[in-house]
Every structure is written in C-alpha cells, then in structure tokens.
Image: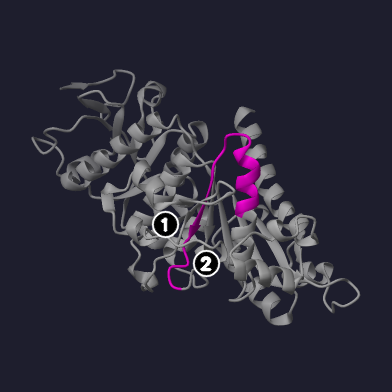
C-alpha cells in the first residue's frame, strides 16, 4: 500500500494503491473526506483510490490500467458529465460505475441509458463499496470467461393488449434461431409478461423451470443455471417461460432482472424480450438498453392512438427513434382496409415499414397446435413478413458490428 503524488498535478491530487486488480475509484477531496473508506475499512479489498476534482481529466495511464472505474459524477456540473461521457465514448468496453449524491430516479435512468454499468450513492460507505467491488470482480471474470460476448437485445412491446405481440415474438425469434443455428449463433427469448405470458403455450412448450427460478435465484444465477432454465425448441431457440403462477409486477427485483438479461447477453447472440403491457421502471430500463424495439399495433384508430402515446413516452425517455420499429399486425389486403400504412405513419408521426398479413385461420391453427406457422405453410405471406422482422434485427446487429470495427 502506498500514496503516490505527481508533481505535474495539483497538490490536492494523489493516488492510494491497495492491491493491483485494475479496479479504480476516483473521488474529489470533499467526497473522500465525507466517506468512511479510509483507515482499515478497506481491509481485504484491492483497488486504487485517486483523489481528483469532479471535473478533472482522468490520467490516460490510469484508464489504460483499469478494468473498471468507479468515478464521481456531479449531474449539475457540465464538465463532470462531459468527463463521464468522454470515458464511455473512448472506452466502450470499460466497466463504469457513476458515484452520485442524491441520485434521483431520472438521473439514474439517464446514466444507465448513457451506457454506465451501475450507479452508487455518495457519500461512499465501505460496505456499499465492498458490494460494488465484488460485483465488478464477478462481471470482469464473466467477461473474461465469455470472451467479451455481448448479445443484441430486441424488445417487443404492444400498443394495447391482444394485438399479437407474443405471436410475433415467438414466431420471429424461432425463425431467427433456425437461420442463426446454421452459423453457430444462439437466440434466446424471455417471456417477461410475468402475469399473462403465453410464449410457452404458443410454442407447445411447458417447463418445470421458469423465469421465477431466475428471479428467485439471487447471486446463484450463472450461465449454467440460465441454460438449465431455458428450454430448447426444434428450431434451436432457447426459451425462458413466464412464471407458472401470477405474481405482482412490482415484486420483480429490478437489479436481479438486469443481472439476468446481462448474463443472457453474454451467453446468447440475440436476446428477445417479450415485455408486459404495463410499464414498470425495469421494463422501461430494458427497452432503453435495447438495440431494437418492436412496437406492435393494428391499423385501427384505438390501437394507433395508443401506439402514438407509446412512441411519445419512449421519445420522452430519450430513446433513439431510429431504434423503434412499428409493426402493423393483421393487415388486410389493400382493397379491404380502411387505413393504410401511409395513414398509420402519418398518425404516429413515425415510419411504419413492417407489417404482418392477416390470415386468422392459419395463425389460429398454428397457435392451437403449438407449432410454427412456417411448419404449416412455409410459403405464406405471413412467413415472408415475419422474415422481414428477423432481417431488421440481423441488419441492425451487422451495422453495429461494422461501426465497432470502424
């Protein structure tokens, strides 16, 4: 252990080394003094504590050595926020935890949407720091083990209940899994509609293990348990079914569900999330983390009205509109429909480029039998439309891979 000062830095800057595991904590002098982490409170921990002003640049050598950084952030300080944004932009794979005073829900959401891995409250307490350090060590170990695999998140939401969102989720995810399997990739679908989920029923699957086992698993949930809970379908899709018993939406532990989805990202190439109709803090946070958001609606006045409200809500949460893809379901042939896709786009003030043809007998027969529409009529218009949905996901993932290479 030792204190290192740098003559080129202001006098109030110093570094305290306790071990060498690439875990860094950066606090201002005021927050160091307000904390209870000095003395012997960090016994058994390994980290590097650097005292820097909340807006001071982080030394490049520190960043180069770091596997994870816990950094003080002052939301009202433009330079402090710019420092955080710069760290994330320049180091997309570096684990970042924002240490914030009086963190309001809106602030925490904004930080998480910006790509921060976690948030810890100031003034810093030794037991909170120990907990976050343990979590960071676990994440680092998992990242190393899984070779930095980060799967794409695809969220499916609905304008109103009964628009066929789960049908689209199960059918599209299955088609995606069948084609991805040929390339050695894996697709997973989570039925997160914990009260009325039907994904398993629509695919003719029942499982003794469900999402509830993951939610109740706490820190025991790892890659092995996750794969044990999933059920593999004939297409290669890995499905996590909704709980067998209805449970209150507010009973879901947000941190646990985030941990589960992050774990799924490290184990699968694409993770589909069939979300509940009612918004919660955790479901909104999952949508904010998604690379693709499918909003399913019908070409009716009532459905379009609610879809417009949903889009407005997502925009208010600073979710990039380009990530939101409206799917118009049960679209009649042009001769019979009163509202067209162009009319819907105008009503929503948002593009409507995806649609699913209306073929009630075919869809009903597939769902009743618990089989894929493709297995009953592979050349149907619906299968072509569902493939367009899959292609949207694939193209988005490819574009992001090219951006990372660039």
Using the image as rendered, state which of residue 386 and residue 257 is in the foreground: 386
Crowding around mark 1 (Cα neighbors within 10 Å: few <14, some 14 to 19, many 20+) is some
Q: Is residue 127 magenta?
A: no
The Cα atoms of the two marked residues, 2 and 1, are separated by: 39 Å
Q: Is residue 306 in view from this perspective? A: yes
Q: Nearer the viewer, mark 2 or mark 1?
A: 2
Image coordinates for residue 30, horizontal then vertical, percent: 24, 43
Using the image as rendered, state which of residue 155 and residue 196 is in the foreground: 196
Residue 184 placement, left or right of 28: right
Q: Residue at x 16, y 40 (%)?
A: 37
Residue 308 placement, left or right of 237: right
Query: Mark on residue 201?
Result: 2
Q: Circle 2 — which element?
A: helix
From what the image shows, is residue 95 above or below residue 372? above
Image coordinates for residue 62, horizontal then vertical, percent: 36, 24
Q: Which residues are magenta?
A: 173-195
Residue 70 placement, left or right of 315: left
From what the image shows, is residue 378 above or below residue 246? above
Q: Earlier in the sequence, mark 2 or mark 1?
A: 1
Image coordinates for residue 239, horizontal then vertical, percent: 49, 54
Residue occupied by mark 1 = 107
Q: Residue at x 31, y 33 (%)?
A: 52
Quadrant for the C terminus, please: top right
Q: Residue at x 20, y 24 (%)?
A: 19
Residue positioned most to the top: 7
Using the image as rendered, state which of residue 220 and residue 373 is in the foreground: 373
Q: Is residue 72 in view from this perspective? A: no
Snapshot quadrant of residue 24? top left
């Amino acid at each position: 252990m030792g204190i290192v000062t740098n003559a080129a830095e202001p006098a109030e800057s110093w570094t305290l080394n306790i071990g060498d595991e690439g875990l860094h904590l950066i606090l201002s002098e005021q927050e160091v003094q307000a904390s209870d982490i000095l003395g012997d409170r960090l016994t058994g921990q390994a980290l590097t504590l650097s005292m820097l002003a909340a807006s001071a640049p982080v030394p490049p050598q520190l960043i180069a050595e770091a596997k994870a950084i816990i950094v003080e952030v002052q939301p009202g300080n433009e330079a402090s926020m710019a420092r955080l944004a710069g760290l994330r932009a320049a180091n997309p794979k570096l684990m970042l935890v924002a240490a914030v005073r009086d963190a309001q829900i809106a602030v925490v959401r904004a930080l998480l949407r910006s790509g921060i891995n976690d948030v810890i409250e100031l003034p810093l307490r030794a037991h909170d720091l120990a907990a976050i350090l343990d979590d960071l060590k676990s994440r680092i170990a998992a990242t190393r083990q899984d070779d930095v695999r980060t799967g794409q998140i695809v969220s499916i939401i609905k304008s109103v209940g009964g628009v066929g969102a789960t049908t689209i989720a199960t059918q599209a995810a299955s088609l995606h899994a069948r084609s991805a399997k040929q390339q050695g990739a894996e697709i997973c679908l989570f039925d997160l509609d914990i009260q009325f989920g039907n994904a398993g029923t629509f695919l003719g699957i029942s499982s003794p293990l469900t999402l509830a086992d993951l939610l109740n698993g706490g820190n025991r949930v790892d890659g092995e348990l996750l794969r044990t809970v999933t059920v593999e379908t004939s297409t290669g899709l890995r499905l996590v079914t909704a709980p067998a018993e209805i449970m209150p939406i507010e009973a879901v532990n947000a941190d646990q569900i985030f941990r589960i989805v992050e774990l799924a990202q490290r184990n699968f190439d694409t993770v589909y999330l069939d979300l509940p109709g009612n918004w919660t803090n955790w479901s909104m946070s999952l949508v904010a983390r998604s690379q693709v958001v499918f909003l399913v609606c019908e070409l009716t006045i009532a459905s379009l009205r609610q879809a417009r409200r949903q889009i407005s809500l997502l925009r208010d949460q600073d979710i990039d509109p380009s990530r939101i893809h409206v799917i118009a379901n049960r679209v009649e042939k042009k001769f019979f429909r009163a509202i067209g896709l162009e009319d819907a786009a105008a009503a929503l003030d948002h593009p409507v480029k995806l649609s699913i043809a209306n073929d009630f007998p075919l869809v009903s027969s597939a769902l009743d039998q618990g089989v894929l529409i493709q297995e009953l009529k592979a050349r149907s218009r619906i299968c072509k439309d569902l493939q367009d949905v899959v292609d949207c996901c694939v193209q988005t993932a490819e574009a992001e891979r090219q951006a990372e290479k660039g």
